[in-house]
Image (cartoon, rainbow, N blue to C red):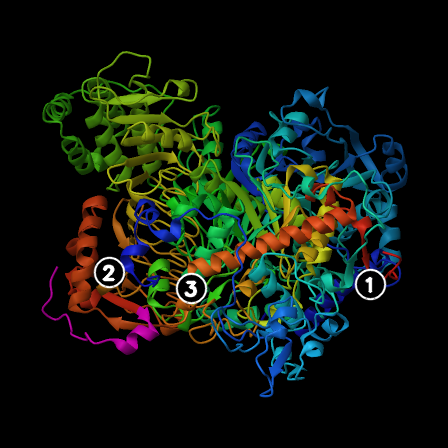
Amino acid sequence: MKSRNASDMKLALDRAQTILRSRAEFRPQGEWLRKPMEAEGGCGVTGFACTIPVGGKHIYEPSIQMRNRGNGKGGGIAACGLVAEDLGVTPQILKEDYILQIALLDPEARGEVERKYIEPFFDIDQGGIIPTVADYRDVPLLEVRPPDVARYFVRPKARQLEFFAAEKGLSGLSQLDLEEEFVVQNSLRLNTDFYASLGEKRAFVMSHAKNLIILKIVGYAEAAVQYYQLSDTRAHVWIAHQRFPTKGRVWHPGGAHPFIGMNEALVHNGDFANYHSVCEYLAQRNIFPQFLTDTEAAILLFDLWNRVYKYPLEYIIEALAPTTEFDFDQLAADKQQIYRQIQAMHMHGSPDGPWFFIIARSLVEKGEFQLIGITDTAMLRPQVFALQEGEVSIGLICSEKQAIDATLESLVSEDKRFTPIADKYWNARGGSHTDGGSFIFTVSPTGIATNGDAGKYAMTIVDKFGNPVQISKEQVHCDLSSPFNLPADGRKEAALIEQSVQEREPRLLYDHLKKEMAGLDYNRLRWFSGQIVEQMKLKAPGVGIEALTLLLDHHYPVGRKKRSSILTILRSALEEIFTAQPLFDESGDGTYRRITWESRDRLRTPAGAEKTLLINACGFSPEGADCDATLAVKAYQMGWKHLVHYNSRGTRFHAAGFGPKTDGLRVDCYDNAGDYLASGMDGLEAYMHGNAQDQLGQITKRGKMVIYGDVGQTFLYGAKGGECYVMGNAAGRPMINAVGRPRVIINGTALDFLAESFMAGNPHEGGGFAIVNGMRYNEEGNLIPLDSPYPGSNLLSLASGGAIFVRDPFKKLVDEQLNGGVYRRLTKSDWKLILPYLRENERLFDIRIERDLLTVDNVVRLPGEVYRKVIPTKDAELETDMEGLDECYA
Amino acid sequence: MSTTTNNKSELSATADEFLDKPEYAQVTRDVRPTVPRYRNELGKYRVHRASTCKQCGRCVEVCGYGVHTRPTGYKLLIRPFDYRCIGPDCEKSDTCCLKTCPENALSLTINPAFETIGDFRWTPELIASTWRMAETGHAPGPGQECEFGASGGGFDRICLKFPDSPPATLRPEEISTEVLLNRRNDSRQRLKIDVPWYGGGMSFGSTSINTILSRARTARAWNTLTCTGEGGYVDRLIPYADHVITQVATGLFGIREETIQRAPVVEFKYAQGAKPGLGGHLLGDKNTPPVAAMREAVVGVPLFSPFPFHSVYSIEDHKKHIDWIAHVNPRALISAKVSTPADVDMVAVGSYYAGVHIVHLDGSYGGTGAAPNIAKKNIAMPIEYGISRVHRFLVAEGIRDAVTVIASGGLRSPYDIAKAIALGADGVVIGTAEVVALGCIRCSNCESGCGCPRGITTTAAGYCDRISIDWGTQRLINLYSAWREVLVDILYRLGVESVAALRGRTDLLYHLDYEPEDGA
């Protein structure tokens, strides 16, 4: 902005004003009556961007995973970066034409719509009703017939454009800007005439973008793919939305997501607390929502800031999710200046969350396609980002992790260049100075595109500030489609497996592989894990399962291999051992029994040596009587004391519902165990082998929870006690409103609001505390400290009890991050208190106290030099033990 | 009796350990006159006996209200129980003590203290009639106002339209007051309560253990429910578990799997009508050691519950939340307690689709003194609008008979209940009325200091023992009995054969602001 001179600014301002003024005709007559927002709950959102165009069937699986976030009364998809031949047009038409898609709620309206809003204004290169399944009732779960959709590839008529420019005073606009405004206003008029005005709703514009289409229905999103036969229609970017409208009878999909801006489609999870304020803001700019949902308001804001005000994406994101408090203080001075202006100007239009947006966007001029995820400053909606790079690259954004994995699995089944596990999963921190709460995946053409869309594409990933998200280019994926060979000499490994079986010692294999992994090639690893399966699945399945689990759980140097590929290999080996265990009607006298959805009725009490029940969660419902967690409760009541859930795809409530005093029960979860894991546990032990989801350990009372990965939102909300060990990070609001004596180690960090309203008494008298180590594993598998042990603005806010111990050797945490707390030196008794937990942490995760935690810049420090304590201000007044730690060692 | 609350072993004991104690003896619905705890209960009138009295006992003979008594074997009359006096109306009858006193020793004045109790909604008259019902177990006598307060709005402006004569076929003893709570047609229990009301959530901490137990015992006697409130489940309630709703509120205080598992109904408190937009709060002084022990918090620290649930920011979170509780307790019905915002109809229908059995609309007239005025008086819509709006919306959606709608917030009497049901509720939740029956004078200082001088909304030693469990229970049983009597009479006079048949009968109502009172 500095480089712009005053006259440039004025020009830009005039330009924006002219466009907004040109929309005066859309202002309703008389006093503008604010219509209430159509009530809508939250939803499930998912999307991905890929360097190769892939079929719509791949948005199908993740949509099913999100199904229980909707109620089948609204679903939709958008596809961006399409393939010309799939649409039956030439690449040139796809590149140059606007794709006007009109939902004909009344099929009879077609002729009228064409006569009034299409034929007079556009040259039509192709048009017609898009194909559908003959009878909508053939599509499962579809209860309302989706509208016919007419699709036209159009270019505005030159003469009409001239006329439009003259009439609206828009001659100053560039050709593209003029065309776009023309298209938008034409759609607005069409919608006003056929949809938004009082009376019968007959037709509306679903989308009008270049190289992007939207389809929405009354039903689940995946039904849109089926009904409109998009399974094999390819696109670079797909997004989908499951809606949960609370109004009972919905007969048309006007309110369903995605909503169209100009060349972008937006889906949204959450709702705006200030819908009216946003609408007022828009009305001041001659913008009037027609579909009465906050999602529409969101895309109208985006389009306004993007196309009218010409803001760069960073500023649009700032206007949507302002940077506040401590995060604002961390910004550079020039950025603060700009952001302050943006906030002052647009605060009334800034949607007050909770919300999470996913946007698919076609960048017409550059021929690029984008997938954008933005979370609000309060971070109250679930969100996961993921990335896989390789011969083909894919970026994914979703409400729940299992939808990401379901997408990948769906892609793997068709194209072995994908792997079922992403290279990286992460969360965004809304309105933050670190990533700005947003990540942008851009698919750009590289080299010379031979014709249109047949070129090669590359993907870049940046956050709000343009900082790239990088993963190692050194590491390569394993080509799992090719067979592996017998290695020249495998005697040593064979002997090791033999020894493990003899001694029943999984650690022999684990220690060996951990040490050797960096130098091992994929071929040898695949052979080795195959050998483990062969030698152990019948003779010593327990040893095999534990060895593979240890390898799945832990981090270690991996050399030039990708960790995601290693995990894929190990996980499929584990699956083979699981599958080799007998079902209830099969013969076998081992300690394992297996149960599946099909054989669930055969559950019985454990007999003989049987100890462990393996529950294949595939096919079970996410909740209710048909949930695998419900089966687990039944099994426990029958006497099973060790339950293993695997192949979970977001099924919920694992390790919950067993009632009080469950000492001696152990629950292991693999893959994507869903929300509320280990909630209410009282004595049991729960192990999550991988990343966990939201609402873990609510009201937990006693017992032990171990997470070999990250945890989601509101971890341990209202907890009363229990020991919890998290290898990675927690998302927003961990331990909020916790009381009693929960004792928690988070080896990574938390997004924000850690231990808000913590009421856990005095840790030295049996109260609770959290230890935050602020570490992470890099791609090489080494443990390194994070830039800041805690990036958030609220640490132990409004707390009345408990304490937080933070590993912060460089004193990076500042007073501004506290609200009712104070920093204190670590005392000798503090160290004595937390040491046993750090020791258990060391045992579980191999995060060593001396080597990893107390070593700072290669020097082993005293605990008091490394850890700081945060306590409520009130407690600080009562403090007596101010003794230093000078002679204290681990 | 030893009913102290800070006894640690009692708080952590199991059900069996309680059952042999006298307080857990089976309670019946039988009405037993239960006099006030105070010798000189506040009443509207003051009856003064001058020194000219000759102790002839004539007044004892004529008074039908028990104002004058001479205990057996005593020579002297005792001070008049003037709170029982019906006032000047009595002078029209032959049984008036003033007229019959040969010495003219008796005089009647208005008690100036009476006007100082209560407020516009709970007028002194309504408080006194509630006390009378709790004492006698029957409809209050003549001259006792038990329908209207003086709020100038709400149920005070809505009247029942009684036909000239009830249908001849209707017999009062056949009138049903049952309410079915589960209408979802699922595998969960088809719970019915015998009267169209149950007790609302009042936590241990905000009220005393004796209050809580009195309410629970009454709920069992009358086959209805009471609610834990948000402070957790007091162990001493376990013997009444089939009649105790476990409330899950935003602070999640004291919620454990076992407390969810033993409940017939689990209630999510999303909002309170008395303070929409605010979570519950318990000020530091009331966070006494036993309260802190149950909530596992720090003694003396104010306990605020967040608003809203940090894990529920949308309808699918709401559904997930319900699914969780339903998973933990596969038997329980689920209730969602919400306030009455402008889009309360959407909230109700959304809750239904998310899986609740009971939509509990909490209006803004209720709440004890702890609810801040700014919230109480400025947010959300009046309950009578909310009920009708939700009822009509659910009917239009075609799901009215698949969900139970319960209204609460300032329902003071059987008349209010009948009005709420005629507006479209299936039943109601009460709270303050029970507290009044236990002697509350609506001083509205529930939250301050260590709490209630009358020993109701307090857990402080020396205060909470002012109510014994037996006394409290009987007062409430009497109140319930009187209420049912009045309600049956209302239904009889309306010509409606059951509470269920009254639902949505707005034709039986009129509003004083809009319709002139006709011949009803």
Q: Position of residue B282 (x, y in %)?
A: 45, 67
**CA–CA distance in space, label 2 to label 3:** 23 Å
Q: Are marks 2 and 3 on the same chain?
A: no
Identify the residue shown where x is 41% and y is 38%.
A422
Image depth: mark 2 or mark 3 in front = 3
Q: Could you give the CA–CA distance between mark 1 and mark 3, rounded to whole angstroms? A: 40 Å
**Disc with the residue nearer the chain's start (1 vs 3):** 3
Image quadrant for the C terminus of chain B?
Answer: bottom right
Is B57 situated left or right of A165 in this image?
A: left
* Badge 2: residue crowd in 10 Å (few <14, some 14–19, many ≥20): some
Task: State the SS at label 1.
Answer: loop
Indicate yes or no whether the magenta region holds residue A874: yes
Q: Are marks 2 and 1 in contact (CB under 8 Å)?
A: no
The image shows residue A801, relative to residue B509, as above or below, that is below
Eyeballing the image, is A319 above or below A247?
below
* Residue stretch in magenta: A871-890
Local secondary structure at mark 2: loop
* Res A835 → quadrant: bottom left
Query: What is the chain identity of the residue bearing mark 1?
Result: B
- Work out whether A443 lies above or below A90: below
Which residue does the numbered mark 3 point to in the structure image?
B205
Give the quadrant of residue B415.
Answer: bottom right
The residue that disc 1 covers is B512
Q: Nearer the viewer, residue B467 or A363?
A: B467
The type of residue carrying mark 1 is Leu
- Where is residue B414 shown, x and y percent of the image? 67, 55
Residue with the mark numbered 2: A766
Q: Position of residue B306 (x, y in %)?
A: 48, 61
Provide residue B59's location: percent of width, then percent of height. Answer: 63, 74
